[in-house]
Amino acid sequence: MQKSLVATNDFVVKFANVNGSGSASANGLFAKVLLRMGVPVAARNIFPSNIQGLPTWYEVRLSEAGWLGRRGGVDLMVAMNPQTWDADVRAIEPGGYLLYDSSKPLPASKFRGDINPIGAPLTELIASNFANPRERQLFKNICYIGVLAHLIGLDGETLKQLLREEFKGKDKLIQPNLKAFELGRAYAAENLPSIGLRVRHADKVGDRIFAEGNDACALGAVYGGATFCAWYPITPSTSLAESFQKYCRMLRTDADGKNRYAIVQAEDEIASIGMVMGAGWAGSRAFTCTSGPGVSLMTEFVGFSYYAEVPAVIFDVQRGGPSTGMPTRTQQSDLLSAGYASHGDTKHPMLFPAHPTECFEMSAAAFDAADFFQTTIFVMLDLDIGMQEWLTEPFKWDEKRKLNRGKVLTHEDLEAGVPFGRYRDIDGDAVPYRTYPGTHPTKGAYFTRGSSHDKDARYSEEGAVYVEGMNRLLRKWETMKAMLPQPERRNAKRRTPDGVIYFGSTSPAMDEALASLEAEGVHLDAMRLRAFPFPDEVFEFIRAHEQVFVVEQNRDAQLKALLVNEGGVHPARLVSLLHYDGTPITARFITREIAERLRAGQAAAMPEKAK
Amino acid sequence: MTYIAKPPLHHPSLEKNALGFTRRDYEGRISTLCAGCGHDSISAAIIQACFEIDLAPHRLAKFSGIGCSSKTPDYFVSPAHGFNAVHGRMPSVLTGANIAARDLIYLGVSGDGDSASIGLGQFAHAVRRGVNMTYIVENNGVYGLTKGQFSATSDKGSKAKKGAENKDSPIDLVMLALQLGASYVGRSFSGDKDQLVPLIKGALSHKGTAFIDVLSPCVAFNNHVGSTKSFEYVRAHNEAVNRLDVIPPRAPIKAQYAPGELKEVTQHNGSILRLRKLEDDYDPSERNSALAYLARKAAEGEIVTGLLFVDPQARDLHDSLNTVATPLNKLTDADLIPPMAALERINAGLR
């Protein structure tokens, strides 16, 4: 036996299960116990595009230091899926631990010499206590949590409390769950030693919540005044529409049961965005949620929205592309298809939330921005931020905040003689005024069209009229730069010629990578982008550094392409770090890549200096 | 003719409706369609219908897709907001606007290319949902703007202007609308204003999805011998099952009719559809027998017109969605933003 890993509140546990076996609730419980014990946790579900029978994993990283990105590597594997056994065993760090079901003996060849196998006869324990086959399958999960509780020192009372909360209302399930948990724990206490990985109470969670980005966006849409969601089911965005339904039922139902909202499951993504256009045009805040394939289908309407100036919000929960790609894996690979969606000269604002709290805030902000700028606003999530529970600051709302409906002329305005021309730039910010349909009997009507039009929305094929309109849209684009979420700059402790740019769900891994690089004496100034179009500050940051790493989760360096295209940056100044295997980017990856490239750069520069 | 402005002056002796509007208040810009186009007659019928049912012009919302027919909303009821959407996708845009502002009257105008080819899916789904709207297809069996290709409503065996024969089976939008649950279905002919105007009036007064298929010959590309959508062919094969009069809510009933020859249907808004039977065995309150009748007549090469089906008590999409009576676009911040305490509770539930 080799060395055994020893760590407290800083290790990775991975559960390998079969999907449809009911493991998700037991595994989720494991993460929540840790949070209740005050230990920060980053948990990720790695699941197939399938309902039953394929492999699924749940990875829990404990980090008392508070690092919430995926670390990479596994210290303790709970191997419950024979299909993936070999790969799961291979994934364990040397000196790590393997918890497995020892009800049937396994040949020595199935193990590794440099890890610590821990067998518990889970199937036997459950079979001798439960008769029903489905119960046997379900309670095996909570049974291994019982074994783990002994092995690493989970707080049993907290876990039992959580079980009672979890199954409140389904009280029949509480007793058998508690029994299965105790079976595992008692067996382990009698037969197994505790291991080098330990959990202890800490006080590092504070008032943070454990939330998914999709859920947070849905709640943000409710607070942001959205009244209409038209959508078409697609992984990984579906839960956003479902959460909107849940929160609207809770928060937008009148006493007589009538709804102050509407949700339509459309026949496809084209109809979804079409309905959103109609509602936005008529003055309701409306959105759709989708993923890359849906964005592809929506592009014609997105171009319409740009040119006819109709507000819309699209939540793009990105997944692995191209084509059907990897529906249940994460990527940031829709930046170009969303940012430049549709034929002709078009571009569209994108917001890049970095955690679920920001999902909530940017979701609400997106509706203000869409109404004000009268165009489609993309909120760019990805599977990692959208569908995984992240430890994040609680949602906050300023009670005094008003919804900004933008430049809308009312019946009173028109009656008072305020002149109206749909596409006239009255205020010099290139943002025109609009009217809702039915506002006034004789004033304020106009004809919305995607064909070229003059300042008063009349059809025109005159070149000069067309150019004037297109140039105003460019000026509107400039106005947006200062009004959308600004980038977040973090300076290194020392002056450095190196910078790094990143965005979205890369953020927790980047936080950790920057800290570990600094510990190694590598200093970088960092900038987190929060919106497209990029304000000048982004290009000043690039100009102020000799080289800037651009970290993104796609193959083709799409953010770099946007930076080069929009800011005229010389491509050589931007060094791409690309992670695109569908798993969330890790701090280990970023640290290694940056360190290697800086070393290689210094090595290449040496002969120069020697001259 | 686009650039000739219509004079805004009205003759003082022009007839006014109950709201004090003249027929000219329902006009639009000058049409840019070909001289003699059936679509212009339909626009005129829409103007007449809106005038006669005393619809405040700005309470109408007009929608269309792409194609010759879809240009027409610019040519009627200028005081109404209009939305010329992308090709084949008008139904979804209209649906969204209707959900946002349920207090307006919705009119979608489309063509056979826009609704039966590229937009067949959206047409079908909007009808299925029972969107409260009047949906008019100006059906000429041909792509006019791109100069004469067959559309999906072209009859099998129909000839194109240059002689090519259509080999594909036609899509009958009336049958489709009936199957999908439209609650008011009619068919008419752009050349029969007396039939068309009441059909549109009844549709605009109907709650639920009202669909009217209007045969509207294309004078430029589909009005020749061998076409089944020409003026001559439609006139020769037009078989009206009934004649409709629409009496607005609260209007005095003037004429007296002998019992038996008339059927009266009261719609949701109180308007009365007065139907005079022309065909003895036709009952427009029976969806399935209407379908069977239409199928039989289509096989005989007849074009059945009139009010083909009506369910005066239909439900609409807002009933299904159970939305508040206040239009969603008129809800205030107080209606929309939940209290802080709710956010605190949600936060607590996520710990």
Image (spheres, coloured by chain):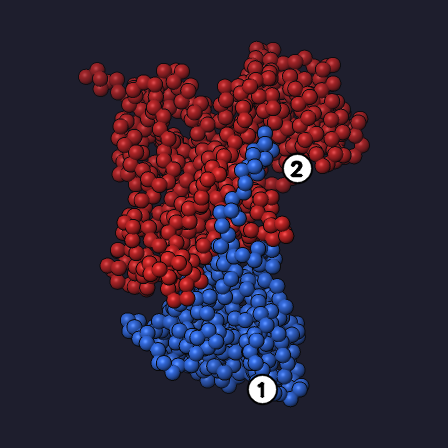
| Left or right for A10, reference A343 | right
Q: Quick one: which residue is furthest to the bottom in this view? A: B258
Q: Residue at x 50, y 52 (%)?
A: B331
Question: What is the x, y in percent for residue A316?
Answer: 47, 43
Asked whether B282 or A20 is in front, the reply is B282
In this view, A423 is above or below A588: below
Q: Residues within 10 Å of mark 2 (few under 14, many from 20)?
A: some
Quick one: which residue is furthest to the front in this view?
A416
Q: Secondary structure at mark 1?
A: loop
Tell me residue A1's x, y (percent). 60, 11
Q: Position of residue A327 (x, y in %)?
A: 52, 41
Task: Name the tint of chain B in the rendering.
Answer: blue
Q: Chain of mark 1?
A: B
> Which residue sits at x=43%, y=25%?
A511
List the residue tagged with mark 1.
B255
Task: Give the CA distance from mark 1 to mark 2.
Answer: 71 Å
Of the residues shown, which amino acid type is indicated by label 2? Answer: Gly
Residue lying farthest left? A611
Q: Amino acid at mark 1?
A: Ala
To the question of a shared chain for discs 1 and 2, the answer is: no
In the depicted structure, whether residue A552 falls above or below residue B95: above
Total numbered labels: 2
Q: Secondary structure at mark 2?
A: loop
Taking depth in this image into account, of A605 and A560 the one nearest to the observer is: A560
Residue labelled with disc 2? A20
